[in-house]
Amino acid sequence: MATKDLSQYDTESVPSAKNMRFGIVVAEWNFDITSALAKGALSTLQKHGASEENLLVKYVPGSFELPLGAQYFAEMENVDAIILLGCVIQGETRHFDFICEGVTKGTVDLNLKYNKPFIFGVLTTENVQQAQDRAGGKHGNKGDEAAVTAIKMVHLKQNFSL
Ligand code: DLZ
């Protein structure tokens, strides 16, 4: 995957998502940013063959709630991977650190608990500009990157179980 432009990747290296089913959890905090991440993720999944009926989207209040929203997907829907989309912007207090720690640790734990890809599509930035730059701006869209990662991880798992 690209490190400078989140939307730049080798298209040929991405497997078909035709028969894959995805859950996408979107945080409502900084919604102008997270809705742009969701738009990127959805269009990238469709670009690689996922059908609209296999793309399930749910919303949670903030990034801190993303892991639980993702766990609901794992327990209540038949999905191959879950993408967590959020945007945490540094404020004046340590809240930023606690939210980032919670969502990061929560996501890692879910991957291992369910043996399923839970993709970390959370922007953690110092300011709004940095977030906009990574939500369809000059550094691409982290939603695109998260979608490609999800497809690749589902494919990887499918190859193991062949
Ligand atoms: C409270 C809070 C703050 C200050 N900042 C953000 C943020 O930048 N991004 C985000 O996604 N959520 C934020 N939240 C909300 C928390 O994620 C969470 O929803 C609340 O602490 C309630 O659990």
Image (cartoon, rainbow, N blue to C red):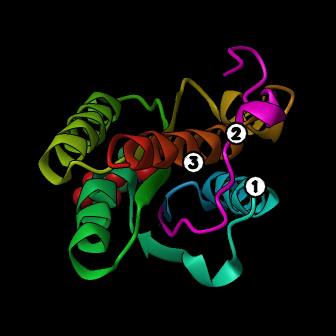
> Are the residues tagged 2 and 1 within 8 Å (C-beta)?
yes
Q: Does any atom of ligand 1 lie closer than 8 Å to the CB of label 2?
A: no
Q: Does any atom of ligand 1 lie closer than 8 Å to the CB of label 3?
A: no
Q: Position of residue 38 (x, y in %)?
A: 65, 60
Q: CA distance from mark 2 to mark 1?
A: 8 Å
- In which image quadrant can residue 66 be found? bottom left
Q: Secondary structure at mark 3?
A: helix
x 69%, y 27%: residue: 130
> Are the residues tagged 3 and 1 within 8 Å (C-beta)?
yes
Q: CA distance from mark 3 to mark 2?
A: 7 Å
Q: Is residue 108 left or right of residue 93?
A: left
Q: Position of residue 72 (x, y in %)?
A: 25, 73
Q: Secondary structure at mark 2?
A: loop
Q: Residue furthest front?
A: 162
Kindly identify which residue carries mark 3.
Answer: 151
Indicate whether 38 appears above or below 14. Answer: below
Q: Position of residue 114 (x, y in %)?
A: 18, 54
- In which image quadrant can residue 65 be found? bottom left
Tell whether position 111 is magenta.
no
Q: Secondary structure at mark 1?
A: loop
> Are the residues tagged 3 and 2 within 8 Å (C-beta)?
yes
Q: Residue 14: which numbered mark, if any?
A: 2
Q: Amino acid at mark 3?
A: Ile
